[in-house]
Structures are given as structure tokens and as C-alpha cells.
Image (cartoon, rainbow, N blue to C red):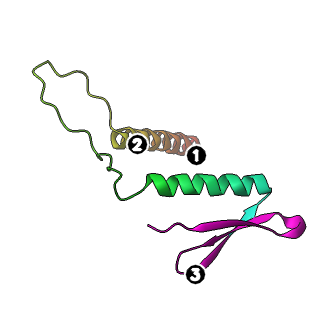
Amino acid sequence: MADNSYRVVPKGKNGFDVEMEKPGGRKTTVPGFRSEHEANAWIVQTKRMIRDAGPWTPLAPRKPTAKPSDEAPQESVPVPAQIEQKQVQNTRKRAASRRADVRAGRGQ
């Protein structure tokens, strides 16, 4: 696996860019760094991320495996979708309550 080469390029008073050169000779510029230190830190972090995401890195499982248990089931923990649904229902109830109050006020 060939490595990319990185170079910090000053942009005058406007900061710094990082120039990446891929093995085939293609160059890409990453703009917007305020200091040379920030650009160098980005290069170090990018190299670490690329190294750690190699093809030999095992993928983490998306869902935990279900383990059957003989114990009594504990209280169910609400799923985010259930929480969101409950929030929507509460909002609808409040809106209906306000509409009823406004209608009652108009009728008087």
C-alpha cells in the first residue's frame, strides 16, 4: 500500500493549506488552516486514521448479539423511536389544548 505525501503550503497572511499528493501523481489541496501547527496536526491525525482503517482492521458488530436469559425480564428501556413518538403525542395534546382555549375565548 503506497502512502500519500503531505506538505504544508503557506497562503500569505490568510493561513495555510495542506497539499496531498497521491501515488499516481494526483494532487489535492485541503484549505483553511489558521496556523502551521493546525495543518501539521491535521496531517498527523489523517495518517493515523488511514493507518487504523486498513483492510485488516476487523469491523465492529452493528448490533449486540441477543443472549437468551432464563431470568425474569427487567423493565423495558424505551427505544429512541418510542421516546420521539411520545414527545410528538405530547406536543399534539398541548396544541389541541391551546386550540380549545382559544375557541372558548372567542365564543365568550
The answer to whether mark 1 and mark 2 are in CB contact below 8 A is no
Of residues 47 and 84, which is closer to you in this image? 47
User: Which residue was labeled with disc 2?
Assistant: 84
User: Which residues are the magenta region?
Assistant: 1-29
Residue found farthest to the front: 2
* Residue at figure coordinates x 49%, y 44% from the top left: 95
Which of the marked residues, 3 or 2, is nearer the chain's N terminus? 3
Of residues 90 and 7, which is closer to you in this image? 7
- Residue 7 is drawn in which quadrant? bottom right
The answer to whether mark 1 and mark 3 are in CB contact below 8 A is no
- Residue 28 is drawn in which quadrant? bottom right
| Disc nearest the viewer among 1 and 2 | 2
Please give left or right for residue 29 compared with residue 72 in the image.
right
Residue 4: in magenta span: yes
| Mark 1 vs mark 2, CA separation in Å | 33 Å
| Mark 3 vs mark 2, CA separation in Å | 50 Å
Which of the marked residues, 1 or 3, is nearer the chain's N terminus? 3
Which of the marked residues, 1 or 2, is nearer the chain's N terminus? 2
> Mark 1: which secondary structure?
helix
| Disc nearest the viewer among 1 and 3 | 3
Q: Amino acid at mark 3?
A: Gly
* Residue at figure coordinates x 58%, y 81% from the top left: 25
State the image coordinates of residue 63 (x, y, percent, origin top left). Answer: 27, 43
Residue found farthest to the left: 70
Q: Amino acid at mark 1?
A: Arg
Residue 8: in magenta span: yes
Q: Quadrant of the N terminus?
A: bottom left
Q: Is residue 81 above or below residue 56?
A: above
Q: Which mark is residue 106?
A: 1
